Image (cartoon, rainbow, N blue to C red):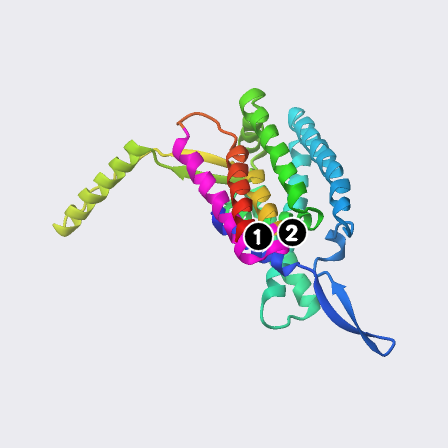
């Protein structure tokens, strides 16, 4: 699901990439930059490299404020307000992702219809995700939420500012998981009290479980060949929690590379983000919490280095 979300993210970011179009102004054709991203989602225009560095502190401050607000609302159990906040954000970013696919289709969709379709889908999906806890809707919506978020932030980053962001987020992730336990508390609150979780639940098997599963498959195959039916054996599996930030920051990074270097280098970024996550799952021990961002950032930095060598 992680890699699928990354690929959807690249498609959405490509759909919202500004295009040069020719427009007739006062009888002459002029090149005008057209930004497909709806105006109410557009960020301040970035013209020079220095502008990226000016915006970065504002992003970090906003990030700290958002964490502080979520912490206070969680601490004092304002679950209704948090659910409303989640619902609004989820509907907005789902709308962005679905609208992006309408841009990518090879035929023109009526403007009003193009606005109505994602609105209806986003409202229905958001309602079931936040208020009804449908597993299928949760998984599908998670695939579409993070590409929409990334599409908003990619335009205000260049490669250097996104690297700085990744390093800061990685340090914060290590502190929040290993030192303060803030991430574990937030995940527990979202799952058990808020009933809304931003991220993926990833089931995985350890070595012993994989051997047992292989044995059960062989026994089932033999029973089937003999025409016998045997009752299946249940098995408890480990469940890894992958937070939303662990998904969206690689999409933002790949999106920045997509706009600066092209598709193949961006795919390299997504590949190495996925490989770094696989490495984390391989070395992770049962019952322990690990910050994913340091591992993902390491993979992204390797991917960026290779992308610039291609």
At x 74%, y 47%, the residue is 49
Residue at the right extreme, as displayed = 26
Q: Nearer the viewer, residue 197 or 41?
A: 41
Q: Are marks 2 and 1 in contact (CB under 8 Å)?
A: yes
- The answer to which image quadrant residue 129 occupies is top right
> Does residue 34 lie above or below 125 as drawn?
below
The disc at residue 66 is none
> Does residue 231 lie above or below 287 as drawn?
below
Q: Main secondary structure of the magenta part?
A: helix
Circle 2 residue: 151
At x 74%, y 33%, the residue is 61
The reply to whether residue 293 is visible in this rendering is: yes
Residue at the bottom extreme, as displayed = 27
Q: Nearer the viewer, residue 268 or 9?
A: 268
- For this view, does 216 lie left or right of residue 183? left
Comes first in the chain, label 2 or label 1: 1
- For this view, does 158 lie left or right of residue 105? right
**Picture coordinates of residue 274, whole percent (x, y):** 47, 44
**Picture coordinates of residue 41, whole percent (x, y):** 73, 52
Neighbor class of circle 2 (other Cα within 10 Å; few <14, some 14-19, many 20+) is many
Magenta range is 257-284
The reply to whether residue 5 is visible in this rendering is: no
Residue at the top extreme, as displayed = 179
Circle 1 residue: 9
Q: Can residue 33 be found in the magenta stretch?
A: no
Q: Nearer the viewer, residue 247 or 269?
A: 269
Residue at the front extreme, as displayed = 309
């Amino acid at each position: 699901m992680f890699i699928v979300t990354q690929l959807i993210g690249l498609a959405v970011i490509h759909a919202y990439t500004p295009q040069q179009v020719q427009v007739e102004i006062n009888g002459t054709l002029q090149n005008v930059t057209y930004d497909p991203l709806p105006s109410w989602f557009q960020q301040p225009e970035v013209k020079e490299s220095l502008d990226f560095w000016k915006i970065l502190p504002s992003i970090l401050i906003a990030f700290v404020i958002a964490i502080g607000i979520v912490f206070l609302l969680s601490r004092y159990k304002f679950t209704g307000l948090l659910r409303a906040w989640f619902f609004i954000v989820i509907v907005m970013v789902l709308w962005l992702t679905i609208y992006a696919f309408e841009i990518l289709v090879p035929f023109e969709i009526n403007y009003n219809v193009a606005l109505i379709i994602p609105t209806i889908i986003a409202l229905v999906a958001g309602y079931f995700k936040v208020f009804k806890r449908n597993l299928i809707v949760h998984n599908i919506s998670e695939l579409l939420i993070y590409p929409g978020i990334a599409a908003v932030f990619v335009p205000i980053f260049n490669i250097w500012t996104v690297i700085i962001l990744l390093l800061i987020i990685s340090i914060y992730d290590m502190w929040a998981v290993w030192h303060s336990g803030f991430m574990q508390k937030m995940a527990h609150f979202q799952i058990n009290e808020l009933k809304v979780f931003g991220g993926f639940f990833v089931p995985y098997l350890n070595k012993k479980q994989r051997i047992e599963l292989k044995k059960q498959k062989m026994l089932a195959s033999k029973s089937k060949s003999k025409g016998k039916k045997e009752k299946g054996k249940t098995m408890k599996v480990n469940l890894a929690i992958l937070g939303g930030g662990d998904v969206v920051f690689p999409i933002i990074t790949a999106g920045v590379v997509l706009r600066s270097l092209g598709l193949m280098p961006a795919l390299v970024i997504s590949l190495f983000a996925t490989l770094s996550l696989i490495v984390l799952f391989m070395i992770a021990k049962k019952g322990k919490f690990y910050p994913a961002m340091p591992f993902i950032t390491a993979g992204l930095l390797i991917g960026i280095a290779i992308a610039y060598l291609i």
